[in-house]
Image: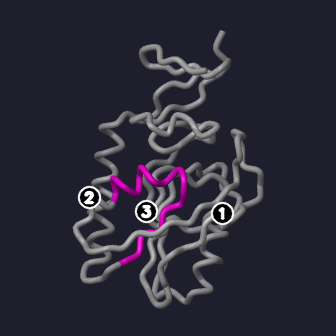
């Protein structure tokens, strides 16, 4: 059960406080879209979102790019219902489009250890793309365990659990317009 109290959200005994408000997120998404549009001018990249978390970010991102593009999705699982990654990635949905020789932009909501990005890069490499870049709204630099390159970064954040703007806890709270960070145990 959750309840919103002013600038905090309580889920069970966990207290979440605002980390990034809606205006800050939207301003940064527009900046990322402008940068990607410039880099892919004259091209038609395929934006590959990672379900379920990246769908909100991807939606806002492509609404703000000024280039033609296509969209497809991988569905991966690495968290289950936990607050930390299981350390394993499972592919739950394959791509529907042909990406051979295409320019690919992987769209992630958050890069924690880098395991999911590494997993997707390996999958996409099998299709011999023309190019491949990664955009992530959030990156936890101190949590990275894999050597992955994130080409476009929205925000660096602390290595704490976050919810909102597509990010969930047990499949809930994706619909929050801001991003909240786990602060501590509530009383």
On the picture, is 53 further left or further right than 146?
left
Q: Is there a contact, CB below 8 Å, between mark 3 and mark 1?
A: no
Report which residue position mark 3 lands on. Answer: 152
Closer to us: 17 or 92: 92
The magenta segment = 45-61
Q: Position of residue 11 (x, y in %)?
A: 61, 22
- Direction from residue 186 to residue 45 in the image, left or right: left
The front one of 45 and 31 is: 45
State the image coordinates of residue 87 (x, y, percent, origin top left).
77, 55
Q: CA distance from mark 2 to mark 1?
A: 28 Å
155 displayed left or right of 60: right
The x and y percentages for residue 39 are 31, 75
Q: Earlier in the sequence, mark 3 or mark 1?
A: 1
Residue beneath the point at 40% across and 57% down: 58
Element marked by disc 1: strand
Instruction: Check residue 87 for magenta coloring.
Output: no
> If you read the primary sequence from the N terminus, does the residue marked by circle 3 or circle 2 appear first?
2
Q: Secondary structure at mark 2?
A: helix
The residue at the point 59 percent across, 61 percent down is: 75
Q: Farthest top residue?
A: 187
Q: Residue at x 60, y 29 (%)?
A: 182
Spatial separation of the CA atoms under disc 3 and disc 2: 15 Å
């Amino acid at each position: 059960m959750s309840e919103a109290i002013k600038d905090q959200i309580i889920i069970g005994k966990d207290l979440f406080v605002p980390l990034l408000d809606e205006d800050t997120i939207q301003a940064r998404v527009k900046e990322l879209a402008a940068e990607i549009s410039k880099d892919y001018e004259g091209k038609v990249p395929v934006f590959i979102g990672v379900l379920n978390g990246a769908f909100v970010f991807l939606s806002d991102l492509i609404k703000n790019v000024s280039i033609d593009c296509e969209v497809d999705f991988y569905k991966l699982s690495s968290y289950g219902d936990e607050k930390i990654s299981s350390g394993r990635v499972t592919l739950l949905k394959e791509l529907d489009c042909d990406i051979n020789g295409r320019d690919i932009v992987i769209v992630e909501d958050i890069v924690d250890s880098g395991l999911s990005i590494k997993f997707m890069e390996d999958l996409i490499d099998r299709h011999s793309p023309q190019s491949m870049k990664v955009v992530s709204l959030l990156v936890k630099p101190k949590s990275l365990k894999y050597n992955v390159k994130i080409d476009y970064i929205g925000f660096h954040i602390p290595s704490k659990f976050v919810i909102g703007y597509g990010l969930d806890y047990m499949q809930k709270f994706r619909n929050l317009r801001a991003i909240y960070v786990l602060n501590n145990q509530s009383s």
